[in-house]
Image: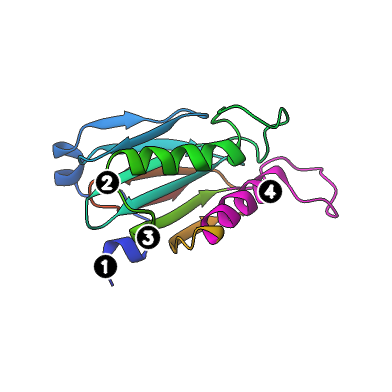
Amino acid sequence: MTAIDRLETAEPQASTSERAPNVYLFPGQIFTSGESILVSTILGSCVAVCLWDPETGVGGINHFLLPLNPLRGGADARYGNTAMPRLLEGMLERGASARRLMAKVVGGASVITGLSVSRRSIGEQNVIVAREFLRTLDIPVAGDQTGGRRGRKLLFDTGSGNAYVKEI
């Protein structure tokens, strides 16, 4: 099994974190690179989607808070239905091919208690938006760690496509 086929649960090796520059991704941001950059973020009900093209080594990640933009337009990356196309666009601009992309989906926890069990949580809705976008473009999900009640710390190496997840 190669690293892109799974989500790691341990921190990256020191050699990985020492050689790759680090970037922190805030909610509502998107980051793409053709170089090896170690991107970190913290997720609760938010979702991050990591995309990677194994042929070009181009990787990218988004971090969105809510599933749908209530204004039905614009390019606000805080919303899944705008963050997903913007991430794909950034990947294509760097030379990635949509038909070679592999995805990892992380986050979408139900961290707020007291919501009706008959309604989907914000986290669950975020995961659905991400998976539906990937499904419509036939982008396979190579790793997935979603749902639950705890937040997660995510580290993504844009150059190798490796993702490391730790529940917090």
Neighbor class of circle 3 (other Cα within 10 Å; few <14, some 14-19, many 20+) is few
Which label sits on residue 58? 2
Mark 3 vs mark 4: in front: 3
Q: Considering depth in this image, is 105 or 56 the residue closer to the camera?
A: 56
Question: Mark 3 sits on what residue?
Answer: 99
Most extreme residue toward the bottom is 1
Mark 3 vs mark 2: in front: 3
Occupied quadrant, residue 25: top left
Per the model, the C-alpha gap separating discs 3 and 2 is 13 Å
Looking at the rendering, the stretch of residues picked out in magenta corresponds to 108-135
- Label located before the other in sequence (3 or 2): 2
- Label located before the other in sequence (2 or 4): 2
Badge 4 element: helix
- Label located before the other in sequence (3 or 1): 1
Per the model, the C-alpha gap separating discs 3 and 1 is 19 Å
Question: Mark 4 sits on what residue?
Answer: 125
Is there a contact, CB below 8 Å, between mark 2 and mark 1? no
The stretch drawn in magenta includes residue 83 = no
- Label located before the other in sequence (2 or 1): 1
